[in-house]
Amino acid sequence: MKEILVIPYWEDFDDILGKSRPARLCNKPLEYPMSEDVTKNLVLVRSIEQLEELIESGDANLTMSFGLHMRPQLDYETGDKLFGIVERLSKCKNFHNLKWRFANGWDIYNLDEEERRNWLIDQTRLIKQENISIHINNFLTVKDYKKALPKADVQFYNIYHTRLFFNNEKFEFTPSIEKRSKHFVAFNGRICWHRDYIVNHIESKYKEKCYYSYIEKNKTLGIQQSKDSDTGETLTYEMYNRQHEDWMAKTPYKVINDSYATVVTESFFEPNSIAVAFNGIDEQGNDDINIKPVGIANGLITEKTYKSFLFEQPMLLVAFPGILAQVKEMGYKTFPEFFDEDYDTELHHHTRMHKIIASLDKFMQMDINEVHKLYHSDSVQEKLKHNKKLFLKNTFECPINKWFVPNKQYQLS
């Protein structure tokens, strides 16, 4: 039978799992353009009565898709509302064939997850574990869910693979074999202290030896021309202009091909920065958006790191401690030939930053000709090709592709 992803779309349901951006991408799909390839494997149900009728029909293998919040309390504070849906549907013929998917392919910070995990286990107590899927973007959180739900389909999953790929698939990028003029590139957007630290160091010592941007401080990489991946139209825009669609995913090829490595300043460097980022009222009107600081924030990797895999560059990761080890556990190769990696195990944030700076300074002592030779060595090229191949494998084999490959406008979580 045909595999169908079922998306609840009635108004009352929005109060349960529909407030955050990832959840809205799951449960408010009509707000986003969808191709025919998407809609033929997707059903939007606008009432629980319509859903009951669909389940009773038994015409397809159905998977209910729910979006998990970025902020766990917005899930578990809904109490028994999810169980109310499960209990009602449990009276339907074919209920025990119904699959249930809970997903957030965007940002999960591994904070306050125990409370949500216990809530989810309780709310789904009438569902066989084998019929539950958890697809989330945090490598460490996935491990905890696997322990709690050993018979469920629990997978590490993020939208960043498809987001990067579908914004670059029609461009022909080939790494340059010519000598490049810069040691590295560092892309920076939102203001935060670890980016301040890196950019200040760059400007004091390496301004002429690298490319760097800092969008919220009006430091850009100038003007570039690039084709729109849908229309083929050549557009002229300021690199990393937030007004340009998917500005974070469109890497300027001429910059990548004129630098040998990437200094990746990830979204967060230490837990306090999460509290700063989520303090106030968000665009959906939620006035309690602070993520409760329960546990240790870690495990999140975004498109900033994945770009280095797709575009074949060694990386220095300015991120949570242990992220480099996590990257290795995911199967990617790292580059101690370029950057000392002892910073990754340092838990004290300021000490870790000092070790990162020391690693960068050591790399910058290399002559550009020596860097060129190292970059094109057989061992480094083998690792770069491996990383790109693994990135593409993860793109095409991600869990959502059981139903469809999302296009760039409709990045279903």
Image: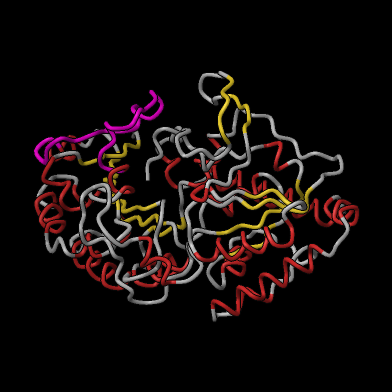
| 278 sits to left or right of 328 | left
Colouring style: secondary structure
Rendered location of residue 395, percent (x, y): 54, 44
The N terminus - image quarter = top left
Along the line of sight, the residue nearer the viewer: 57 or 242: 242
From this view, report whether residue 118 is shown above or below residue 17.
Answer: below
Spot the residue most to the front.
204
Check the image and report above or below for 129 versus 295. Answer: above
> From the viewer's perspective, is 174 left or right of 152?
right
Task: Name the residue at 62% across, 32% down.
Answer: 223
Residue shown at 57% from the left, 37% from the top = 250
Residue 166 placement (x, y as % from top left): 53, 34
As displayed, is residue 296 above or below residue 167?
Answer: below
Q: Name the spot of residue 246 as percent of width and height, x first.
A: 48, 37
Magenta span contains residue 62: no
Kindly identify the residue that appears in the image at 63 percent across and 65 percent down: 328
Q: Left or right? Give the position of 402 relative to 362.
A: left
x and y, in percent, of residue 10 in the image: 14, 39
125 or 205, nearer to the observer = 205
Q: Residue at x 69, y 48 (%)?
A: 211
Extent of the magenta region = 26-50
How many discs appear? 0
Q: Quadrant of residue 368?
A: bottom right
Residue 2, picture quadrant: top left
